[in-house]
Amino acid sequence: MPTRTVAVASAVGLHARPASLFTQAVAASGVPVTIAKDGGAPVDASSMLRVMALGVKHGEEVTLAAEGDEAERVLDELVELLSTDLDAEPEG
């Protein structure tokens, strides 16, 4: 099972808007993905409540794992997403 470890860049961690954007991206991928804090049990990454319950703060590392034919691609996209401050106002 492919995995990736990434530091969460959002200033508020995985709370509110960043958690919502992340879980929506996981659900849209169609690939089963889990997320875990260091030393913690993995949870369903498409579940907003479970992701927020992890209490991931800015700069903390999480490990993502996925299964399936598209696992590598999906994990790469999710790492890119979490490496971005998702709480920042969109430019435009």
Image (cartoon, grey):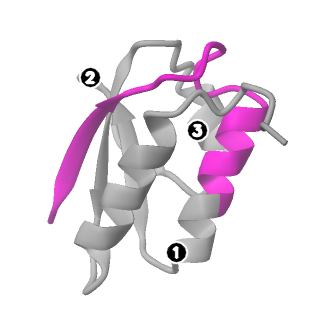
Mark 2 or mark 3, earlier in chain: 2
> Is residue 4 one of those drawn in magenta?
yes
- Kindly identify the residue that appears in the image at 68 percent across and 35 percent down: 18
**Residue under label 1:** 29
Q: Amino acid at mark 2?
A: Asp
Q: Position of residue 45 (x, y in %)?
A: 51, 52
- Badge 2 marks a residue whose secondary structure is loop
Q: Mark 1 near mark 3, Cβ–Cβ under 8 Å?
A: no
Q: Which residues are magenta?
A: 1-24
In this rendering, the answer to whether 72 lies above or below 61 is: below
- Badge 3 marks a residue whose secondary structure is helix
Q: Mark 2 near mark 3, Cβ–Cβ under 8 Å?
A: no
Q: Position of residue 85 (x, y in %)?
A: 59, 27
Q: Amino acid at mark 3?
A: Val
Q: Quadrant of residue 6?
A: top left
In front of the other: 42 or 71 = 71
- Kindly identify the residue that appears in the image at 27 percent across and 82 percent down: 68
Q: Which mark is residue 51?
A: 3
